[in-house]
Amino acid sequence: MSINLLSQIFLANSLFQDLAKTLGAGSAIILIIILLLVILIRNIRVVPQANAYVIERLGTFKETWHTGLHVKMPFIDNIVKKLSLKEQVADFAPQAVITKDNVTMQIDTVVFYQVVDPKMYTYGIENPILAIENLSATTLRNIIGDLELDETLTSRDLINARMRETLDIATDPWGIKVNRVELKNIIPPREIQNAMERQMKAEREKRESILRAEGKKQAQITVAEGEKQAAILRAEAKKLQAIREAEGEAEAIISIQKATAQGLEMIKSVGVDNAVIRLRSLDALAKLGDGRATKLIIPSDIQNLANLVAAGQEIWQGVDADRQDASSDEDRQSEKYKDQMNDELVGRFLHKAEADPNGPQI
């Protein structure tokens, strides 16, 4: 650096002498002032945001410039390195690693780092990125060597955390902070991939069979529940129907009994005598004999049938007594007619019973 500075000084001195001889003293002074202004402007630097400049003076580290306006000494200070303080990404090529169960695979990593100390980054190591790449490869081999294949495939977070911790400690003297390490791809051999695919296919088929069985089971349970509910509803419907029918029959019986009671009350209010009631009974008995029933139920007071006939005779005798004064011939004919009526009344029942064996029986 000192040799270059002396050569520049000698060159400037020779140029100044040549200009002084050519242009004269006044012009030389003006030219010198312009030259000094140009040199001053060229040594004014503005450091952008998130950047840092490493400055050396006469070959020795002097300071680090951060964001803002700075002026360096011409021909003495020199900007050695311009660094970015932003977080940076280093994507490394896949590395061959061997697991604990002797399976070789390819793994590529991505490292997110940041320069925190420009001086240490400049003077700590010659090529920081190459150093991080080699360090990440060796660290990855050490970690994967303690894990089996299945653990490697399912322990990404563990591997990332251990690698980040190891790299952060190792790069601290270099002025670098490792913020995050990620395994980008884990590529096992083709045979292992085929075996894994077959295993995954078997697992999917197993889950499919289980789901189908569960579906059939659930369907059968649902059908059984539906049938159970239907049976319960049908039983409830039959129960309600029986209750309604019973209530209807009860109301019908009550209505009939009420009508019968009202009829009896009406008969009672009319004041019908026993003779009329007996005649009505005989008429009802005759209608019962005309029915399709094979058996005929005779009232318990059938012995009063003769009395009933006698009552009828008395009625006819009352009619004859009114007509006795008219003619004796008519009396005899009336008596004969009454006997015929009585005989016909009793013989009617006997004739019906003999004529129709399947008909009513006395």
Image (cartoon, helix red, strand yellow):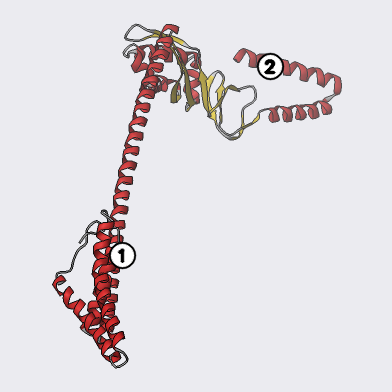
On the image, numbered disc 1 is attached to which residue?
248
Q: What x and y, as percent, mark residue 321?
A: 26, 90
- Is 242 situated above or below 16? below
In this rendered view, identify the residue nearer to me: 249 or 180.
249
Query: Which residue is disc 2 drawn over?
Result: 8
Image check: 10 left or right of 181? right
Q: Residue 190 lies in what quarter of the image?
A: top left
Q: Residue at x 33, y 41 (%)?
A: 227
Residue 312 in sight from this viewpoint: yes
Where is residue 256, by image quadrant?
Answer: bottom left
In the image, taking residue 82 as reference, residue 251 lies left or right, namely left
Eye-nearest disc, 2 or 1: 1
In-front residue for pair 234/295: 295
Answer whether residue 166 is visible to the viewer in this image.
Answer: no
Tell me the crowding category of disc 2: few under 14, some 14 to 19, or many 20 or more residues within 10 angstroms, Cα based.
few
Q: Residue at x 27, y 53 (%)?
A: 358
